[in-house]
Image: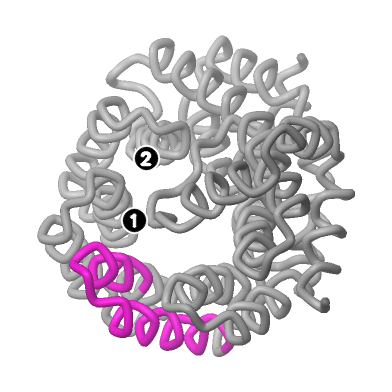
Amino acid sequence: MEIDDARVLADVARRAFDERWDTDSVAADRLAEMADEIDDAVTALIGAGDSDTAANLLGSLSSFWQKQGLVDKGRAITESALKRIKDDQGSQGRGRVHLVAGELAFRQGDQVAALHRTQHALAFSKESGDRVLEAESETNLARIAFRDGDAERIFLHANRVGDLAGEDLRLQSKAVHMLGWAEYTGGNLEAAMRRFEQNAAIYAELNDSTGEAMEWANLGSLALEAGDVDSARRYLAAAMGTPGVADDRYLAPELVRSAGAVAGITGNHQLALELIASSKAMYRNAGLQPDPGDELTPRVEEDARQALGAAASQAIDEGQVMTPTEAFEAARDSLDQ
């Protein structure tokens, strides 16, 4: 790739990063069309000695890789570049590249690598005085603690994010979100739901409809865990009706899985197994491990298997061959039944 073309791609990535909460981002659409060129662009930039631009490109792509269902590819490109950028190059954006690698490792369930990379990002943030990077690094450390089931550590890191946030609503939302999971992990379901309600309001103030949908998804799954099926339906339907969510390869599998849990609890065991199997395939194809916090769906799945007996295998097979669009539409329609 010519160096000028690589720099154009880096500029598109930066604009997509700046617009990452905008469901109508033109830059994000263009970046999706250029996804196959990213590795060549990084190689061209590093080869030309422009590691700062390479680092800024890579540091802009965490949300992109996740939403596009390209976590495996994104992490491989990011890790490869970190090995090729010399320690005295790319210093301006190198810390954020470590954070991207840490976030993608977390999404894959690789706790060791996630912790290693995020600690590097945190060290860079403190050395450079980058408050936003520090807060985002602490957020990922809270996520890692969440997957470990350690409420005390989640509270520790989430409170640090809150201290760093100041008047920055974006950073406040990260703190509140992880405080919600800290409450949940500590066994306080009602307090967790209050946090997610609070955060949905913050996202509304930011005009971030995808962020709102994420918290509605969490509220739906927790309402279902609390036995409130009507509220769960309402939250999940609101999330699934949000523009752009059906194509979000990070959020859509969670919503399909939760709709499957609703189906199972309300006696539709066939649909429950289909949707849960489809969500597993969606996670696998996107290179994602499901986020922690869902203790209900495995029980619903086992109950559905027992209820269907020999027919369970066919339901699972049918779910596995659904396209993501078919699964999302079936899940959304089921919430109206």
- Closer to the camera, 259 or 94? 259
Q: Are marks 1 and 2 in contact (CB under 8 Å)?
A: yes
Residue 316 placement (x, y as % from top left): 73, 35
Q: Secondary structure at mark 2?
A: helix
Residue 273 placement (x, y as % from top left): 69, 46
Vertical position of residue 92 compared to residue 225: above or below: above
Q: Is residue 14 visible?
A: no
Q: Residue at x 65, y 19 (%)?
A: 39
User: How far apart in space, not on screen, are marks 1 and 2 (Cα)?
Assistant: 8 Å
Hey, what amino acid is under mark 1? Glu
How packed mark 1 is, by other alpha carbons closer than 10 Å (few <14, some 14-19, many 20 or more), is many
Hey, what amino acid is under mark 2? Leu
Q: Residue at x 65, y 37 (%)?
A: 10
Render colour scheme: one colour
Q: Which residue is mark 2?
A: 99
- Closer to the camera, 63 or 18? 63
Q: Is residue 170 magenta?
A: no
**Quarter assignment of residue 282:** top right
What kind of secondary structure does the magenta stretch mostly adopt? helix
Which quadrant holds the C terminus?
A: bottom right
**Quarter assignment of residue 148:** top left
Q: Which residues are magenta?
A: 177-204
Residue 279 placement (x, y as % from top left): 67, 44
Vertical position of residue 335 compared to residue 137: above or below: below
Residue 282 vs residue 195: left or right?
right
Q: Which residue is mark 1?
A: 136
Residue 92 vs residue 314: left or right?
left
Vertical position of residue 308 compared to residue 156: above or below: above
